[in-house]
Amino acid sequence: MNDKEKEHLKKAINKVRKVKVFYLHLAGYIVGIGLLLYNLYIVAGPYKNNIISLNLSIIVAWSVFIVIHGLNVFKGKRLFNKRWEDKKIEKFLDKKDESTTFWE
């Protein structure tokens, strides 16, 4: 392996690690938000408003952080890229041809 291939391998390993950490963060976020929402459901007592305010501020802040983390990990990647659009166009064009031949 030459230096260029080693550098490329290191970058690939780093990207995979970042995606893995993001998915772990996302799993923790889902569990944590679920617990916070359950806490909002069962909270009672004289400090109810303070607890609700704290829980809601945690939910909002964590949601902002998870979005920022996701944008940093997947920067430059679009959900619907040009290749996906081309595949869908071809698929619909093929379906149109099939539907016209079916009824003729």
Image (cartoon, grey):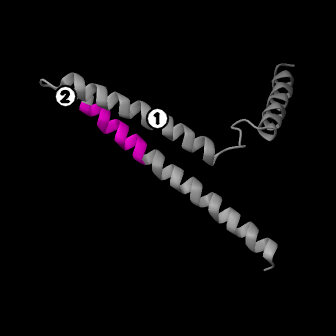
Foreground residue among 56 and 91 = 56
Instruction: Please indicate whether residue 82 sits to the left or right of residue 39 in the image.
Output: right
- Name above or below for residue 4 compared with residue 53: below
Q: Position of residue 100 (x, y in %)?
A: 85, 21
Q: Name the one closer to the observer, 41 or 87.
A: 41
Indicate which disc residue 63 carries.
Answer: 1
| Residue kind at label 1, given as amino acid type | Ser
Residue 101 image-quadrant placement = top right
Question: Which residue is the site of mark 2?
Answer: 43
Query: 10 Å neighbourhood of mark 2: few (<14), some, or many (≥20)?
Result: few
Q: Residue at x 74, y 74 (%)?
A: 6
Q: Is residue 61 above or below residue 15?
A: above
* Residue pictured at 84% horizontal, 34% vertical: 90
Q: Give the left or right position of residue 18, taking residue 88 as reference.
A: left
Image location (x, y in percent) of residue 54: 30, 30
- Give the amino acid type for the residue marked by disc 2 in the picture: Val
Is residue 96 covered in magenta? no
Location of the C terminus by quadrant is top right
Q: Quadrant of residue 80?
A: top right
18 versus 70 height, above or below: below
Residue at x 50%, y 34% (from the top left corner) = 64
Q: Position of residue 66 (x, y in %)?
A: 50, 40
Residue occupying the far bottom of the picture: 1
Give the SS element for disc 1: helix
Q: Which residues are magenta?
A: 28-39
Residue at coordinates 47% horizontally, 45% vertically from top-left?
A: 26
Lateral position of residue 52 relative to residue 14, left or right: left
Q: Main secondary structure of the magenta part?
A: helix
Q: Secondary structure at mark 2?
A: loop
For the residue carrying disc 1, how many other residues have a C-alpha within 10 Å: few (<14), some (14-19), or many (20+)?
some
